[in-house]
Image (cartoon, grey):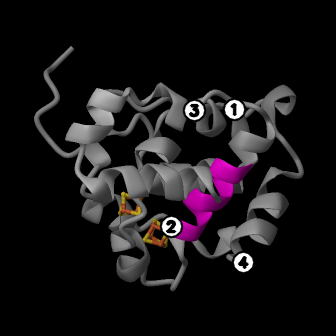
């Protein structure tokens, strides 16, 4: 396998289309929570190409959008992308369809928390680390946890 030399993440799970893993209500739930229409996405990739954290993600933002369209919730909810997202809004301002992708990420984090999926919590931050981490970083973490 070749080394990762571009913007693509080291790995990106294949999209599997089987009846057993399609979550029929997932897209509708994301639509409701985010106030966005997931079917508006036409997979141009602008969100992924502008995301400053794309290389750290296991699933690119545009791929997240496609997986939601297809009702494939497991890879998103159990993956790291929604927690790595820094809510910077870069994807949102780049989307030619006017989709607020950051709001979609917020909705997905809310769904993950509703389902009790483990995530990084304040109790995992030691006092020593909290003293050394930049304040905006901590605020970003707590903002995610409060969605
Ligand atoms: S809001 Fe999240 S997904 Fe969108 S560009 Fe910023 S880090 Fe990437
Ligand atoms: S920029 Fe918008 S239309 Fe393009 S892939 Fe991302 S969400 Fe879809």
**Tags 3 and 1 in contact by the CB under 8 Å rule?**
no
Q: Disc 1 versus disc 4: distance between alpha carbons?
A: 21 Å
Q: Is residue 40 left or right of residue 140?
A: right
Residue 36: image location, x then y, percent? 68, 76
Residue 74, numbered label: 1
Q: Give yes or no for residue 109 being in the magenta stretch.
A: yes
Dot in front, 3 or 2: 3
**Sequence order check, earlier mark of 3 and 1:** 1
Instruction: Reply above or below: 21 against 113.
Output: above
Q: Residues within 10 Å of mark 2 (few under 14, many from 20)?
A: many
**Disc 1 secondary structure class:** helix
Instruction: Give the residue number, with chain letter if any, for mark 2.
Output: 102
Which residue corresponds to mark 3?
A: 119
Assess mark 2: CB under 8 A from ligand 1? yes
Drawn side of residue 54 relative to residue 100, left or right: left
Q: Residues within 10 Å of mark 4 (few under 14, many from 20)?
A: some
Label 1: few (<14), some (14–19) or many (≥20) C-alpha neighbours in 10 Å? some
Please name whichever residue, 141 or 1, is drawn nearer the observer in this view of the structure: 141
- Of callouts 1 and 2, the N-terminal one: 1
Q: Please state if 14 lies on the left or on the right of 39 as rendered.
A: left
Tell me where residue 11 sits by quadrant. top left
Neighbours of disc 3 within 10 Å: few (<14), some (14-19), many (20+) = some
Q: Which of the two labelled residues, at mark 3 and mark 2, occupies the earlier sequence position?
A: 2
Residue that badge 4 annotates: 35
Does residue 9 show up? no
Q: Which stretch did the figure color magenta?
A: 102-110
Secondary structure that dominates the magenta span: helix
Q: Quadrant of residue 94?
A: bottom left
């Amino acid at each position: 396998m070749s080394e990762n030399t571009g913007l693509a993440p080291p790995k990106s799970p294949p999209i599997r289309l089987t009846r057993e893993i399609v979550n029929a209500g997932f897209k509708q739930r994301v639509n409701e929570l985010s106030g966005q229409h997931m079917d508006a996405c036409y997979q141009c990739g602008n969100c992924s190409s502008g995301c400053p954290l794309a290389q750290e993600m296991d699933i690119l933002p545009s791929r997240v959008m496609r997986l939601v369209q297809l009702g494939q919730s497991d890879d998103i909810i159990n993956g790291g992308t929604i927690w790595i997202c820094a809510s910077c809004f870069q994807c949102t301002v780049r989307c030619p369809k006017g989709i607020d992708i950051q709001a979609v990420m917020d909705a997905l984090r809310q769904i993950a928390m509703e389902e009790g999926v483990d995530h990084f919590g304040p109790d995992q931050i030691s006092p020593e680390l909290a003293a050394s981490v930049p304040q905006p970083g901590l605020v970003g973490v707590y903002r995610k946890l409060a969605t």
